[in-house]
Structure formats: C-alpha cells, structure tokens
Image: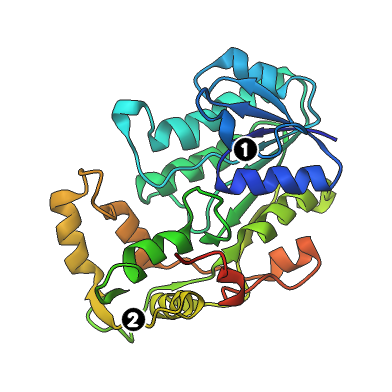
Amino acid sequence: MKVAVIGGTGFVGSHVTQALLKAGHEVTLLVRPGSEQKVSDPQRVNTVPGDLGDPDALRSTVGGSDAVIYLVGILREHPRQGITFEAMQYQGVADTVTAATGAGVGRFLLMSANGVKQPGTRYQETKRRAEQHALASGLDVTVLRPSVIFGDPDGRMEFATQLFEQMLRPPLPAVGFFAGASPKRGAVVMSPVHVDDVADAFVQALTDASTSGEILSLGGPEILTWQDMIRRIGTATGRNKWIIPMPIALMRLGALLFDWLPFFPVTRDQLTMLEEGNTADPAALERLIGRAPRAFSPENLGYLGD
C-alpha cells in the first residue's frame, strides 16, 4: 500500500515510518525544510519538501497514495514561529483532508490524544475539532488516541526523557505532583504506552476494516502514579531520588506568572491536563497488535541515562 505520512519526522512519526516499511508499505513523507536529517531510513522513503502551510506540497505528498496518516502534534505553542495548536492540530488536519479528498485517497488515519474534549484546553479542543472534521469528511477514517507515549526518542522530544532530564538528572529532589489537598487522594495517574506499540497499532489499523469510523484509545498495560513513574525511571538510570509532594495548584500559580517564558517547564494547560490524568484501557491496543503492550518498566526504559 502507498502511504503518505504527515508528521513523519517526529518522535512517533519516525517509529510509524519504520513500522510501515517493515510491513512492506511504500512511504512518502512531507518534510519541512531543515528537517531532512530527521528522515528515518531516507534511502527507502519518498520525500516531498514543504510544510503544512503549503497546499502544493500537501497535494504532492498525498497524490497517488492509498492512505494518509496524520501525526502532527505539539505540546507548546510558539506563535511568533506560526506554531500554534490551531495551525498544527486543527487547520493542518483540515488542509490534509482537503488534499486527500482531492487526490481520491480513501483511507485516513489520525493521531489524536487520550482525553481530548470540548470544552477543554486549547490543546484538547483543537485535537477534538480535528477528529470531528476528519470523521465528517467522507473519508474512511480511524482516530487513534494514545495515552502518554514513551520509548527511544533518537534525539527527539519524549516523555520519559523529559522526566529524567527535569526530575532525576539535577542534584535536587524530584517533584511529585498531586491534585487537590492530598497526595494520596489526588494522585496524578497515567497509562504510559510504548511508541513501538503505537506504531504497530497504526500499521494494523490501516488495513483493519473493523476500525473504520472508530475512535480508539491506546493505553499501556498499567495505571501508574506520577511517583511510580519517577521511581521506575530512577531504577532504570540508577538514581534513587527523594520525591517532594507538590500540589498542582501551587505550580499553576508559578505558570500563571511565567509560562510565557520558553524555559518555564510547564504551561497552565499542561497542568490542567496533568490534573485530569491520562488513563486508557489497554484492550483496544491489545486487539490491534495481537499481544500484550510493553510496560513502563526499567527494562523498557533502558534507553535513558547519561
């Protein structure tokens, strides 16, 4: 199958590209100028230079394809660079759907995120609107909603690596976020899912007719607290850290004052989503990939460290 991938040079995109190639698909990537070095296995993929704001590049990328996979997503906006949730997570999807429809492409897979909703944060709302737009387009659409994704980043941004760099590498205690007034009652919980399992899910969904029109949440095999995840990263990297409880409300006060600064670690929207948690039943993922998902274990976190 000929598959066009939008967002194929990112963390998830590089793994999806490899999984597609392994399954025997022909892959075409839209590659933003300056990101050529991020192309996974450049000798085996087709590339089209351009970005989401270039309709001609989009048409060239999806033209002649049997399916399109849209993987673009951001955690933080940089409006001066044109990097906003609206542009990358909604308008980019809408423009890609238009290009796919015009090219006669039938199949469209969209990576959304677990917990998206309206009303919600700007991140959540643009992801949800993109889902609705794609599903109403007349294309054969499947939406995949991963929980927080971990795995070897190969130099890209990734959840566990960020936790290691911000919480475990510095010679300071780690921060244990919690919601409300009590660390026990307000535990932040997630279902971390391995990037290779997410990639395999995309490849399997591509040709699985039963996923047509569906929104599938992808969760790892365990529900873990923030403290659980810090401890497992500590075990994987040989760093046992003292964890200081930190109410999200206090961190939100700091974000209110400083989240406009690029170096501030979290935004108010990110704290809101952290407070809500990010858990998903692993059943849909298990069914798609035909095996138990990988755990957020020290063995599977071996890519971390100095």
197 on left or right of 81? right
Sequence-earlier tag: 1 or 2: 1
Which is nearer the eye, 190 or 108? 190
122 on left or right of 222? left
Q: Is residue 226 above or below residue 117?
A: below
Q: Please tell me which residue is depicted at 81% across the width and 53% down the height of the picture.
A: 210
The disc at residue 234 is none
SS of the residue under disc 2 = loop
Which is nearer the eye, 114 or 77? 77
Pointer 1 local density, CA inside 10 Å: few below 14, some 14–19, many at least 20:
many
Q: Please tell me which residue is depicted at 39% across the width and 32% down the height of the picture.
A: 83
Residue sitting at the far top:
56
SS of the residue under disc 1 = loop
Q: Is residue 150 above or below residue 68?
A: below
Residue sitting at the far front:
306
Q: Please tell me which residue is depicted at 56% across the width and 47% down the height of the picture.
A: 11
The residue at which mark 1 appears reads as: 8
Which is nearer the eye, 113 or 37? 37
Pointer 2 local density, CA inside 10 Å: few below 14, some 14–19, many at least 20:
some
Q: Position of residue 272 (x, y in %)?
A: 32, 60
Regarding residue 212, the answer to whether it shows in the image is no
119 on left or right of 1? left
The residue at which mark 2 appears reads as: 241
User: Are dots 1 and 2 in contact, CB under 8 Å?
Assistant: no
- Marks 1/2: CA–CA distance: 36 Å
Q: Position of residue 293 (x, y in %)?
A: 69, 70
Q: Position of residue 132 (x, y in %)?
A: 56, 40
